[in-house]
Amino acid sequence: HYAAAQKQAEPAVLQPTPQPKDDFQEELVVRPLHSGDIYASFQFRTLWETDFMRGNKVSHYRLFPKSLGQVISKFSVRELHISFTQGYWRTMQWGQPYLPSPPGAELWVWFQDSVTDVDATWKELTNVLSGIFCASLNFIDSTNTVQPSASFKPLGIGNVTDHRFLRYATLPREIVCTENLTPWKKLLPCGSKAGLAVLLKSEKLFHSSFHSQAVHIRPVCQDWQCKTTSWELRQTLNVVFDLHNSGQGKREWSLFKMFSRTLTEACPLASSSKIYIDITDNPEQFELSPATSLLSQAMVLGDRRTFSVYDLTQQDTFGSVRSLNLLIRWKSTEGDMLRPLLHAERYVAGYGLQTGEIHTLMYNHHPYRSFPVLLLDSVPWYLRLYIHTLTVTSKGKDNKPSYIHYQPSKDRVRPHLLEMLVQLPPNSVTEVTVQFERALLKWTEYTPDPNHGFYVGSSVISSLVPSTVAMDTNSTRERPLFSSFFPCKEESSYFVRVYTEPLLVNLPTPDFSMPYNVICLTCTVVAVGYGSLYNLLTRSFQIEEPSPGLAKRIANVIRKMRGVPPL
Amino acid sequence: MFLSERRRGQLAALSIAAVVIIVGVPLWWRTTETYRAWLPVSQIKELAKLQLQLSADVEVVFARGTVTPEQQKKVPLTQTQEEERAIDGDLIILFLILLIRNTKLESKFFSCHVLFLPEDTALRYSTQADLYLLAFQDVNVYIGQRRTALLRIGPQMRVGKTLEQLLAHLEPRIKQVLQVMSFSHNDITAALSDRVRFSPDNKESIADSMRAFKSSPGYEITFSLLNPDPKSHRLHWDIEGAVQTYIQPLLTKLSPVANFSIDSQTLYYTMLGVNPRFDTSRSAYTLNADSLAHVINPVEARLGSNAASSNPVLNFLLYVPDAQHSPLYIQGRKKQEVPSNAFHSPRWGGIMVYNVNGFYGSEPEFPVDINIDMAKVMGVFLAQLRLLLGVQSSTPPPGFLVARCGSTGLADWELDRLMWSRSVENVATATTTITSLAQLLDQIGNIVINDNIAQQVSSAVTSLQLAVAELEAGNLGFALQYSKEAILASEKAFFDPSLLHLLYFPDDQKFAIYIPLFLPMCVPILLSLLKIVSEARQRRREKQAKKD
């Protein structure tokens, strides 16, 4: 009895504080763009040392959102990437984004290899996600889902690369707005009450040229030995504020001007909370206030960048006014941007409503290196691709892709999937063209506004691009000479994914009152034919004496008067 | 020649009319007919009356010395008691109570042990499982944890009474025991709350019957720790251990009734919907009972719905008030303090306020690390969980002593009671669903009834009949199982999307399609038929005139 009583009393009093097995970090990167616009990228990362797949036992959540955890364990998801984007990222003006995403909604999921019916799970998963994010993801069905064979490899650990367990779908028509942002913010441990998320006010965020929010879930290693896995939830939000629209044309930005809020504290649950300002071009171009002594260098997208760092967990960051309002002021408008090495665009050519041609242009701006890219195209079934007309040309010459994976469409069942590996010669444009025929839809298959056109999702170009650092011969001055003869592997190339514009294609659109017109017309024709036939059959015919002519009648009247018998 | 030509026209018109009527109309009818599979309408109508027979077997054991051996022999083996209850007109419930008075018989459900005791002694009485203690004079009936009750009869019944008198004396008591241990009128009314219209005078019982969750094949239980002030409080709760210790035994016991899944979450910066008032007399913040209704809504927005299933969610929130608004107490309607500092919301869950200002110490250094005393919290949540699941212990009649429930938190007979009321509720719900589906299909002729739906309906009907039969036989487990199947099948049939396909095909559209074809075709036929008839009539009249 005594021992039992001891045991009873112990937990309340003597129990040591359990070490939290989850961790939350928040980060904001601000990059002033050469066009005068400003790019702000938020990242919130929740790490959780747990295993969802161990008999679905995980059910006690602290920092990790419960709704997503339940999704992972119920649908045996290994990796989930979902993004909602409003606007198109202008690579040539803005450079590469930290996290690329196509306009509209994009969802790609790797399932565990224990899933038997992947398609059914995928369907159910999209429905649940559409509920969680208040988006029309329920419109994802077999007609817009593909299984890319090479373009989307798992980003987390795990060595299952059988693309049977991968599903990829885009909804280019999806419009992203406040109702998608609110549930996204709800997934953050601090909500929008504290920390960097305070800045996420929807009226400012959606008053911008580009807005993209995403959720990435993947398993990662817990430590360098990688014996156990953690789950990483990364919530990202990228926004580009326009110089003319929201900056009133002045080259001056502050947190308050961008978000109509200033920062007063870090999220108390975050282990790290930092703001990075990309000052690589400082001080020639702009000045920053308040100034910070903390600097950090990082290789970002193959380029060595320098950042000013503001650590929000330190009280002195906020100064005496207890609020941080970062100010960036441009001094001059000069300076040119490093051209992005890889860039792509796409358009539809042709006239009329029967056939057309899709052109995809891929630019390699590297002066002397060629590199391979993976092009993924998913085209809806109602554009019937003539795959024999597929041509790939660069510099006027035929460029034969070294790998082609083509899955033809099935009407109303699945889309075309075209994946190929193309070598882009240095400093060149590679053009991929393919002709298509527009199919006729059934009249119930048209969208409510068919004359607007039908969207075709962005092409995805994934590539390992040679780093600009490797291109830079002057980099030797920063490093010891002995370390810089052979290009280092990590820095020699970096992964880039580029999305092209979505296409808007007009399909032949009928007059939608047509069925009734057809019914009425057919019925009238039938009725007329039937009527005359009926008449012919039922009318009784008789021989009628032809009536005498007028002259004869007059003559008869006269003859009657004279008393002579008529003619 | 003239006549035959006319005759030929008439014949042609008649034959066209005949072709249209004999071939055209059936063809049109057949091709535009909606497919309607056969439904067991008569059986559904039979079920709609909902005549339930609930039976409970009771074994009565006379302890040694209560009756003389001669009397013991005379005790009838079985005796059946029927009680008829009508609830709201057409529903007739028959309580069938079977009294089995034989110690040899293996009892199915309840056993009443009748003892003779001098009025003023305490008694220890033990069977193989239970230890009963009748210590107090005013305790006449003791209800144990299992399915056993102890009845005490006074000495006046002992001395010189015939067996008949004894039995007559016992009968109302046994009925009372049964009402506590199996089902009372209120339980049945609560289970049938969907079908029964309440009379406005018994508001209290409405509140009682509305508290518990509706019957469902599964429930999700979510414990949420609300920390509105993570800057001041760093809260730690050992929810995993607490669930294992306190909640899991109850749920394991309840597993025949439904599947349960438990999860927990911690939510930060969640505020209550109302601002608590500062009470200077107690130097504490108070929440009034009237304002509790507004507490839940803003919190619920953060709780998040369950993504993985569609079962109802029971929410249990532990709210730790922020440092500025602490301590916080809930005030009852009569301004009295609520000792548990918790309240529950019917069919939603419970909220408990957990004050932590006692942990601050003399010079608090924020954030303060706080370990939450889970035994205290889980005691409250367990009580709320019992209420919300419908394991309510109605106050026993005077003279009754109910044993305290043990480690599982649920006595066997309480589980039986729950299974009874759940079975009755399921049967009632499934019957309502099936009946209204049948009515709907009967009223709207446009609806296509697939074979699939017909099959669901008939399997629901079969399950219902089986459930009713099992209830009658007193097999609770099977009755509950069948009633669950009936609910599943009936819901599946009722919400089948194929029922909606042609539902919104209005008649005017149909006419708009048919008229351009039918009007030009039928008018000549009708006109020529009329003409033939009128000619025939004229001819007959002429013939008659000729005869005259």
Image (cartoon, rainbow, N blue to C red):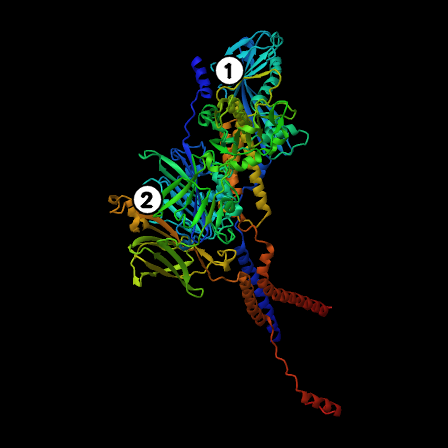
Q: Residues within 10 Å of mark 1 (few under 14, many from 20)?
A: some
Q: Quadrant of the N terminus of chain B?
A: bottom right
Circle 1: element type: loop
Is residue A97 depicted above or below B415 in this figure?
below
> Residue B168's image quarter?
top right
> Residue A233's image quarter?
top left
| Residue B516, horizontal then vertical, whole percent | 58, 63
Can residue B454 be seen here? The reply is no
A44 horizontally vs B461: left or right:
left
Which numbered mark, 1 or 2, is in the foreground of this view?
2
Residue toward you, B101 or B8: B101
Label placed on residue A161 = 2
| Residue A73, horizontal then vertical, whole percent | 41, 37
Q: Residues within 10 Å of mark 2 (few under 14, many from 20)?
A: some
Q: Which residue is mark 1?
A: B103
Circle 2: element type: loop
Residue under mark 1: which chain is it in?
B
The type of residue carrying mark 1 is Thr
Instruction: Measure the alpha-carbon separation of dots 1 and 2.
Output: 69 Å
The type of residue carrying mark 2 is Thr
Is residue A331 depicted above or below A189 in this figure?
below
Residue toward you, B431 or A306: A306
Is residue B357 depicted above or below A548 in this figure?
above
Q: Quadrant of the C terminus of chain B?
A: bottom right
Residue toward you, A44 or A508: A44
| Residue A168, horizontal then vertical, whole percent | 40, 48
Callouts 1 and 2 close, C-beta under 8 Å? no
Residue under mark 2: which chain is it in?
A
Q: Number of labelled discs?
A: 2
| Residue B174, horizontal then vertical, whole percent | 59, 18
B525 horizontally vs A493: left or right:
right
